[in-house]
Image (tube, helix red, strand yellow):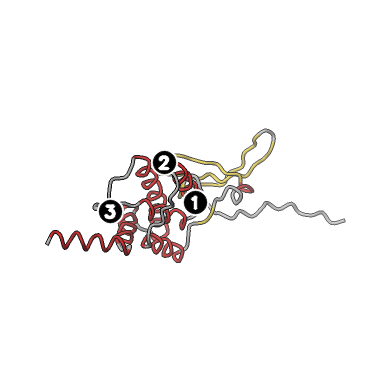
Amino acid sequence: MATAKKTAPKTEFRTGEHIVYPAHGVGKIVRIENQEVAGLKLELYVVSFEKDKMTLRVPVPKAKAVGMRKLADNTTVEKALETVRGRARIKRTMWSRRAQEYEAKINSGDLLAIAEVVRDLYRSEAQPEQSYSERQLYEAALDRMSREVASVEGISETEAVQRIEENLAKSPRRAKVAEADQDKAA
C-alpha cells in the first residue's frame, strides 16, 4: 500500500512581493512563517505596511478569502486613470448613505472602484469646498490609488498623485471649467 506524501500547500504569494490587502492597501510580504496558535500549526504571510508602520499576519489558506491580491497590471492601472478622467457620477441620496458606499469601495481593494471614489469626490480649485468627511474619504481613496499606481509603475507616491491629478484635470467638465477661468482671467 502506497502512502500519499503530504505536501505543503503552494503559496500564491512570494516573499518580497507587493500585494494589496483590501482594508489596508499596498503592503509587502516580508516573510512566510509557521506559528502554533491554540494547538494548530499555521503558515502565515507576514505583510508589512511601511507607511502605516503596521505588520499583519494572514493565514496562507485564508489569503484569497480575505481578498488579498497581487498588484494590478498596467492595463488595469490605465483603466483606473481613464475612470478618473470620466464624468463624476454622484447619486442623489443622503450623504451618509453615499459615504458608506464610498467607504465600502475604498475597503474593497478594487483599484477601479477606488478610482470611481477619487473621480466622484475630486474638487478643483474653482469648485465649492468639500465637507470634512468628503475630504477625508477623497484623501483615503487618493492615497490607496496612488500607492498602487506607484508600486505598479515603479514611481514615487508623489509622482503617482501628480499623474492621477493630471488625469482628473482632463475630465470633460473640469476642462471646460478651467477654460472658462482662463477666459475670465484674460
Q: Residues within 10 Å of mark 2 (few under 14, many from 20)?
A: few
Is residue 177 positioned above or below 50 on the image?
Answer: below
Q: Position of residue 118 (x, y in %)?
A: 38, 53
Q: Amino acid at mark 3?
A: Ser
Kindly identify the residue that appears in the image at 43 percent across and 50 percent down: 92
Q: Mark 2 or mark 3: which comes first in sequence?
A: 2
Q: Position of residue 2 (x, y in %)?
A: 84, 56
Say which quadrant the C terminus sits in.
bottom left
Q: Which residue is mark 1?
A: 109
Q: Which residue is mark 3?
A: 124
The quarter holding residue 42 reads top right
Q: Amino acid at mark 2?
A: Asp
Say which quadrant the N terminus sits in.
bottom right
Q: Are marks 2 and 1 in contact (CB under 8 Å)?
A: no
What element does badge 3 sit on?
A: loop
Q: Mark 1 or mark 3: which comes first in sequence?
A: 1
Q: Which residue is mark 2?
A: 52
Is residue 180 positioned above or below 18 on the image?
Answer: below
Q: Residues within 10 Å of mark 1 (few under 14, many from 20)?
A: many
